[in-house]
Image (cartoon, rainbow, N blue to C red):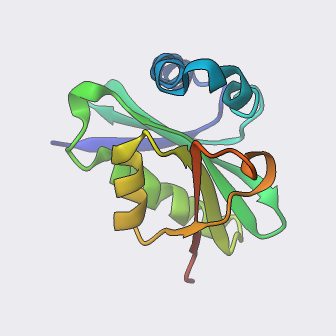
Amino acid sequence: MNIQIIKTNSSNPDFQKLVIELDKILAFLDGEQHGFFAQFNKIDSIQHVLVAYVNNEAVGCGAIKQYEEGIAEIKRMYVDENYRGKGIAGAILVELENWARELNFSSCILETGYKQVRAVGLYKKSNYTIIPNYGQYKDVKESICFAKKLGC
């Protein structure tokens, strides 16, 4: 399978379409908590977005934004369910890490939910370590936060 990953921003219509699908899934998984999480997942001004294509079809996405000096936060990771298990999420994650390095970030952080078992598995397999919940997720028991130092 030939995966093409492009750099773009949050105005990309394919990214916006994928995020709509992601939000439907998260609304189901988050249940009553979805409104809380959704407020932190706005995409209106994300400048560093990746979209993955297979046969010219947008099948996955991810983004980074500055959390604080030297730290990039990974956001909006998603792969269409018909394309999961094919290495696309891992490829997006590697490209996000590479882009973060290019932008002089020294580490990446992210938040996901305990119910997102595949995501948790991906981050552990990709050498992310569990950290105390940060920022707005500090006291949220449904959240699990990860970090990874970026080598040069």
> Residue furthest toward the left?
1
Q: Is residue 60 left or right of 112 when viewed as pictured? A: left
Q: Is residue 55 visible?
A: no
Q: Residue at x 55, y 82 (%)?
A: 151
Whether 111 is drawn above or below 133: the answer is: above
Q: Is residue 91 left or right of 138 when viewed as pictured? A: left
Q: Is residue 39 left or right of 60 when viewed as pictured? A: right
Q: Residue at x 53, y 55 (%)?
A: 96
Q: Nearer the viewer, residue 41 or 12?
A: 41
Q: Is residue 109 visible?
A: yes
Residue 3 occupies which quadrant of the picture? top left
Q: Is residue 92 left or right of 139 when viewed as pictured? A: left
Quadrant where the image shows the N terminus: top left
Q: Position of residue 56 (x, y in %)?
A: 30, 26
Residue 117 occupies which quadrant of the picture? top left
- Total marks placed: 0
Quadrant where the image shows the C terminus: bottom right
Q: Residue at x 25, y 50 (%)?
A: 87
Whether 152 is drawn above or below 64: the answer is: below
Q: Position of residue 130 (x, y in %)?
A: 54, 67
Q: Nearer the viewer, residue 40 or 46?
A: 40
Q: Residue at x 47, y 18 (%)?
A: 28
Q: Position of residue 89 (x, y in %)?
A: 36, 47
Residue 44 occupies which quadrant of the picture? top right
Q: Nearer the viewer, residue 9 or 72?
A: 72
